[in-house]
Image: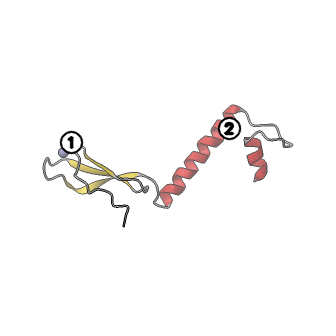
Amino acid sequence: MEWIAARYQRAACPFRPLTEDEQARVEHVAAGCAARVRTALGLARRTTAAPYPRPRCSGQFLVTGGDGELPTDWCEADGCHWARPARNDAA
Ligand SMILES: [Zn+2]
């Protein structure tokens, strides 16, 4: 596999270097593969609809998170946010 990396990096190797279009294609495919792996491992940031409407306005409540960052949440109807507790990193 090192020869493939060498072609991508345009290092000296017995094959012609990749064109810029080919390098862009490699980057596109690699990014797609990385995204699928993160999704399969449950590490990708994703948005999920809550199974109940927001009590105050009856809008659909959406939560985005799952990637280790603070989750974000909002109401699809009016963009209101649910109050969230402060992050406790000391625990
Ligand atoms: Zn709302």
Name the residue tied to disc 2.
Answer: 23
Q: Residues within 10 Å of mark 2 (few under 14, many from 20)?
A: some
Name the residue tied to disc 1.
Answer: 77
Secondary structure type for disc 1: loop
Which residue is farthest front?
A: 90
| Mark closer to the chain start, 2 or 1 | 2
Instruction: Give residue 86's quadrant in the image.
Output: bottom left
Is disc 1's CB within 8 Å of ligand 1? yes
From the top left corner, tell me how far across and down residue 4 is, in percent: 75, 47
Location of ligand 1 given as a quarter of the image: top left
From the top left corner, tell me how far across and down residue 12 is, in percent: 84, 41
Q: State how many labels appear.
A: 2
Which residue is farthest bottom?
A: 91
Q: Residue at x 55, y 47 (%)?
A: 32
Which residue is farthest right?
A: 14
Image quarter of the C terminus? bottom left
User: What label does residue 8 carry, if any?
Assistant: none
Q: Amino acid at mark 1?
A: Ala
Secondary structure type for disc 2: helix
Q: Residue at x 47, y 58 (%)?
A: 43
Q: Is residue 20 above or below residue 90?
A: above
